[in-house]
Image (tube, rainbow, N blue to C red):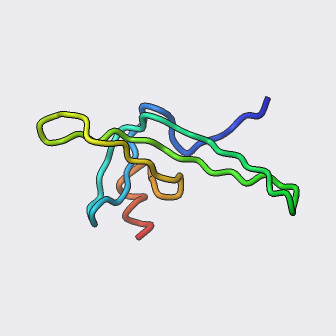
Amino acid sequence: MKTYTTKLAIGDTAWFMQDNKAVSMTVESIEIHEVLDNQSGRCNQSIQYGFRKYTESGRFDKWIELYEYQIFATKEELLASL
């Protein structure tokens, strides 16, 4: 069985940009996709993190899904990447 290493875990806080603002949300899902490239014979991997977005009244609105390169563990890391 293969082991995967992710930047963050479910339950961790992630920072990312949304509508030109730095926001933080709790990681609620992680999806790892590994696809075989038939030409090279190598596997390409992508990791997506899911976040539940709620309305101002507290009702569920939608899922936000971001790739690993789009999220950061701290606000400082996010700002340094800009």
Q: Which residue occupies 68% across, 38% down?
A: 4
Tally of numbered discs: 0
Residue 80, above or below 43: below
Q: Is residue 77 left or right of residue 41?
A: left
Position in image of residue 58 (x %, y %):
17, 34
Q: Residue furthest top?
A: 1
Q: Is residue 81 left or right of residue 62?
A: right
Q: Is residue 25 left or right of residue 48?
A: left
Q: Residue furthest left?
A: 57
**Which quadrant does the N terminus fall into?**
top right
Position in image of residue 7 (x %, y %):
55, 45
Q: Which residue occupies 38% across, 47% down?
A: 64
Q: Quadrant of residue 76?
A: bottom left
**Which quadrant does the C terminus fall into?**
bottom left
Q: Quadrant of residue 59?
A: top left
Q: Which residue occupies 27% across, 63% down?
A: 19
Q: Which residue occupies 43% across, 58% down?
A: 77
Position in image of residue 71 (x %, y %):
45, 53
Toward the viewer: 74 or 20?
Answer: 20
Residue 20, above or below 62: below
Q: Quadrant of residue 28?
A: top left
Toward the viewer: 18 or 73?
Answer: 18
Residue 4, above or below 65: above
